[in-house]
């Protein structure tokens, strides 16, 4: 169903534009396009701001996870060294 919506032919696009021209008139279409452009621009701006905020806030979390991972690896290496040392003695 969605695949059919994505493949609109040239005739269908022309038909949609003709209907829009009849409904809104030639003077209103540039205003409508301008408003839609502003809406898309604001949406992209908000999306980028949310992404940036998530990246900024997750930076500290990533650093904490790296520190914990490093300490766990160090402890595991120390335990392994102690176990091998005990078996060698």
Image (tube, rainbow, N blue to C red):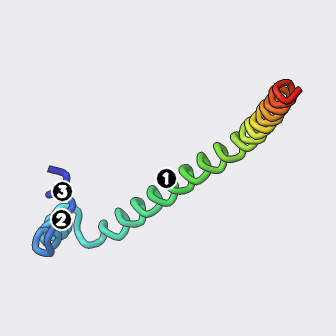
Q: Which residue is mark 3?
A: 3
| Quarter that holds the C terminus | top right
Q: Secondary structure at mark 3?
A: helix
Query: Badges 2 and 3: C-beta atoms under 8 Å apart?
Result: yes
> At x 30% / y 71%, what residue is drawn?
27
Q: CA distance from mark 1 to mark 2?
A: 25 Å
**Mark earlier in primary sequence (1, 3):** 3
Q: Which residue is mark 2?
A: 7
> At x 45% / y 58%, what residue is drawn?
40
State the residue in front, 87 or 53. 87
Q: Which residue is mark 1?
A: 43
Q: Which mark is residue 8?
A: none
> At x 49% / y 53%, what residue is drawn?
43
Q: Secondary structure at mark 2?
A: loop
Closest to the camera, between mark 1 and mark 2, is 2
Q: What is the number of callouts on the image?
A: 3
State the residue in front, 64 or 1. 64
Question: Residue 6: x percent and y percent?
Answer: 21, 61
Question: Residue 26: x percent and y percent?
Answer: 25, 72
State the residue lying farthest toward the front. 89
């Amino acid at each position: 169903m969605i695949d059919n919506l994505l493949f609109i032919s040239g005739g269908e696009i022309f038909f949609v534009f003709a209907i829009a021209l009849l409904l809104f008139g030639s003077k209103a279409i540039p205003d409508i396009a301008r408003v839609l452009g502003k809406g898309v621009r604001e949406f992209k701006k908000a999306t980028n701001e949310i992404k940036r905020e998530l990246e900024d806030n997750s930076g500290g979390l990533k650093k904490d996870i790296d520190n914990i991972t490093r300490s766990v690896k160090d402890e595991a290496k120390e335990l392994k060294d102690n176990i091998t040392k005990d078996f060698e003695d």
